[in-house]
Each structure stands twice: as structure tokens, then as C-alpha cells.
Image (spheres, helix red, strand yellow):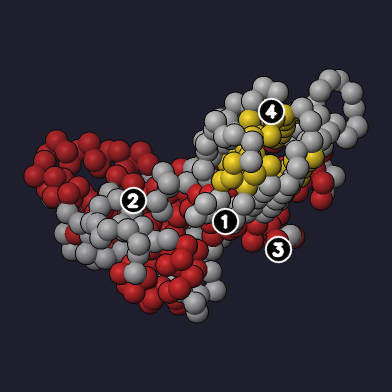
């Protein structure tokens, strides 16, 4: 009785559940994936077959072939247009070695052991996109270990053939409004990735920066799915491409307003932010129209790069490379912040900052010099109370 009912009504998102009890793929592949039917099935089977549903929910799946096997083409693609386009990367055969080489402990829950950037670069040397391979591996482990996330991981990651499409689908869902549909935003992201090849590379460098500098994000897939700073930065990059590259200022400014409401981050689409930047926590970030942030910088929450009045023209700070702006830092006016400078939390900067300077206070004064290491933005060491001439650096 149960299986007769199941074959008529089970939606595709429940396909992995029925692999556990051996229902053939050929039956499931032709079923509707209606969310209403999914709720109906779960409700009925919870009431009539509680022991079976307990088994379905707690049993680990023996495989995820339903996600990335030969039947993938039978599933609807993004927003029901065309066919699903996911393929299993050839380099996925290297995943077992990569997982064994992970720097974190071996675990059988969540997204599995941590795979560091060094592990990835060392192991996946033949991969066309090693970051995407790592993300897919972590998502597959997450789907096995946390069945409640399986549908989300499939829709966001596992059904897609490339990282660009995964990013586009995640962010378009977060930004959609009654006036701007997710399908429209999704198309804008894909257009930006297609017309500006550097767009995808910059996005990957931003994701890698978050992996390396945020101790709370142990997995690449966690950054992709959950990191608000990464999300806000990629949405800003789309708005910036529209504003500077396409001349579509009205749409770019509308996106800015949506991004501000969705993430609590207000970055004017005219601002320029270099590649490999990391925004931690993100809440309260404000960056003005003519501001510039160099490559590989790190910004924490409540950072403001603003003007000093209502004058127009070039009126916002110019931040160099590898700069660390701590929580609550305010920089006002068209002033330069030198490369590898560090502004300690809560400081207010009103005057130019030299290269390698460590600044603190209201108004900020130089309290030390950074020497050694890859730069304050990489070290992420937030210290205060330095005497003049003190240093911050690796091994000092």
C-alpha cells in the first residue's frame, strides 16, 4: 500500500529517501516534484508508517548517485528552463585522497573534515576548478550526514555543473523581491559571468579569502551557503558591473537598496573593491560612491568609508592593499590609507595613513609599525595598546 501510494505521488526531492529502501530509479524519475505533494506524503506516512519514516530519516544514504548520476538530465534545470546541466567533474576521483589529506579531524557529521586551501592546492593539481570540486564533495557529505539539508544542498550546489551557476542561484534567491524576480537576478549574474570572465575568478578569490581568514568558517561550502559577508560582496560586484561596465545605473542603485535591506551592508555600486577581499560579519558596513578598497583587504563589521560633508566629487577614502580595518573603524574624507596598514577597532581616521602604519584612537594616531608576514589583512591579529615603535608581524 505504501509503495503504491509512493509511486504515484512522491516528489523528486524525496528520491534519496527511497534509495534507502530500494525503490528503483526508473519509478522515481517520472514523478512530480511538487512541494505540496512532498508535504502530503510526509504528513500521511508520519501518521500511518511511523517506524518506516524514522528509518528513512536517520539512515545514512549508501550513495548520492541520484544527485550526480546518469539520471540527472531528467530533473528540471534552474527555474524550470531547459535541462539540468550538472556533471560530475573528472577530478572528483581525487576526492578520497583529498579528504584523507584534510587538515581537520575525521568526522562523520556535517560537511566532514575541513579541507584547507593548502590541502586543496596540493591534492587537486589536475582539476580545472579545484574549489568547486571541494565544495561539491563537502555538499555530498553534508547531504549524507544531515538529511534535513539534502534538498537545499541539491538545489543550491549538487544540481549545478559549475560554481558560477551555484553562486547565481543562491544569491538570486536571497535578493528576490516582488518587483524583481529571482529569475531576472539569476540571468543578470550569468550575464556578468559570461561577459566578464574575470568576474568568476574574483568571486573565487573572495571565497578563498574567507576560507583562509575566518576561523568560524571551516568549509568552503559553508562560505558559499552561509557567509553573509561573501554574499554581500558578490551582490555588490554584480551591481558594480551594472553601474560601471554597463551604464545601467538605475538598476544598479535598485540592487544596492535590496542588498542593504537583505544583508545590512550599504556599498555604493560606484565604489571600487579589489579582488580577494574579506568582509567578516558584514553588518553595518558602509562604503561611499568614490571609495576605493585595494586587493586582499579585510574589513570587519561596522566599518565606514565615508565623506566629510555634502560636497560632491571625489570625496571618499582610498584604501591600499592588504589593509586590515577592525570592527567599528571610521575613515572619513578623500584620504589615502597606505598598503599593509592596520586600523585598530573603534578608531576614527581623519588624516592620511602611511604604509605599514598601525593606527588607533579617536582621532587615530600612529601607535606602531607592521613588519613581516603576508600583511595585516591575512594575519587578522587585532591588538591595541601599542607604544610608538611597536611592531606586529609574523614571528616578531
Q: Are marks 3 and 1 in contact (CB under 8 Å)?
A: no
Residue 263 vertical position relative to residue 35 in the rendered view, above or below: above
Residue of label 1: 373
Q: Quadrant of residue 92?
A: bottom left
Which one is in front, 378 or 10?
Answer: 378
Judge left or right: residue 376 versus residue 71: right
Judge left or right: residue 306 versus residue 17: right
Judge left or right: residue 272 versus residue 329: right
Which of discs 3 and 2 lies nearer the camera? The answer is 3
Which of discs 4 and 2 lies nearer the camera? The answer is 4
Q: Are marks 4 and 2 in contact (CB under 8 Å)?
A: no
Residue 134 vertical position relative to residue 279 in the rendered view, above or below: below
Q: Earlier in the sequence, mark 3 or mark 1?
A: 3
Labelled disc at residue 197:
3
Distance between the alpha carbons at the discs numbered 1 and 4? 24 Å
The residue depicted at 39 percent of the width and 61 percent of the height is 115
The residue depicted at 54 percent of the width and 32 percent of the height is 384
Amino acid at each position: 500500500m505504501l509503495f503504491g501510494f509512493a509511486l504515484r505521488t512522491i516528489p523528486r526531492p524525496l528520491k534519496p529517501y527511497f534509495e534507502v529502501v530500494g525503490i528503483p530509479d526508473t519509478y522515481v524519475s517520472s514523478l512530480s516534484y511538487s512541494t505540496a505533494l512532498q508535504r502530503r506524503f510526509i504528513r500521511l506516512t508520519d501518521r500511518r508508517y511511523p517506524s518506516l519514516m524514522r528509518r528513512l530519516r536517520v539512515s545514512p544514504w549508501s550513495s548520492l548517485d541520484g544527485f550526480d548520476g546518469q539520471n540527472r538530465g531528467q530533473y528540471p534545470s534552474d527555474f524550470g528552463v531547459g535541462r539540468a546541466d550538472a556533471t560530475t567533474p573528472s577530478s572528483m576521483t581525487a576526492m578520497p585522497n583529498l579528504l584523507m589529506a584534510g587538515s581537520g579531524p575525521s568526522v562523520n557529521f556535517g560537511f566532514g573534515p575541513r579541507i584547507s586551501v593548502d590541502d586543496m592546492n596540493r591534492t587537486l593539481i589536475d582539476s580545472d576548478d579545484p574549489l568547486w570540486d571541494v565544495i561539491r564533495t563537502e555538499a555530498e557529505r553534508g547531504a549524507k550526514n544531515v538529511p534535513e539539508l539534502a534538498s537545499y544542498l541539491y538545489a543550491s550546489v549538487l544540481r549545478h555543473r559549475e560554481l558560477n551557476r551555484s553562486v547565481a542561484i543562491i544569491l538570486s534567491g536571497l535578493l528576490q523581491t516582488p518587483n524583481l524576480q529571482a529569475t531576472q537576478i539569476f540571468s543578470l549574474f550569468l550575464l556578468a559571468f559570461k561577459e566578464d570572465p574575470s568576474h568568476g575568478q574574483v568571486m573565487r578569490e573572495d571565497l578563498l579569502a574567507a576560507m583562509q581568514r575566518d576561523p568560524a568558517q571551516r568549509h568552503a561550502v559553508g562560505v558559499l551557503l552561509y557567509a553573509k559577508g561573501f554574499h554581500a560582496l558578490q551582490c555588490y560586484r554584480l551591481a558594480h558591473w551594472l553601474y560601471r561596465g554597463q551604464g545601467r545605473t538605475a538598476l544598479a542603485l535598485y540592487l544596492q537598496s535590496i542588498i542593504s535591506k537583505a544583508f545590512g551592508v550599504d556599498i555604493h555600486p560606484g565604489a571600487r573593491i579589489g579582488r580577494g577581499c574579506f568582509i567578516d560579519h558584514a553588518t553595518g558596513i558602509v562604503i561611499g560612491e568614490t571609495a576605493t578598497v585595494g586587493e586582499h583587504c579585510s574589513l570587519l563589521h561596522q566599518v565606514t568609508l565615508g565623506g566629510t560633508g555634502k560636497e560632491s566629487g571625489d570625496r571618499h577614502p582610498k584604501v591600499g592593499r592588504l589593509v586590515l580595518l577592525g570592527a567599528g573603524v571610521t575613515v572619513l574624507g578623500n584620504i589615502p590609507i597606505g598598503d599593509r596598514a592596520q586600523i585598530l577597532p573603534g578608531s576614527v581616521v581623519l588624516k592620511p595613513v602611511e604604509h605599514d602604519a598601525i593606527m588607533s584612537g579617536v582621532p587615530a594616531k600612529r601607535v606602531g609599525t607592521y613588519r613581516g608576514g603576508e600583511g595585516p589583512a591575512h594575519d587578522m591579529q587585532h591588538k591595541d595598546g601599542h607604544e610608538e615603535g611597536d611592531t606586529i608581524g609574523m614571528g616578531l
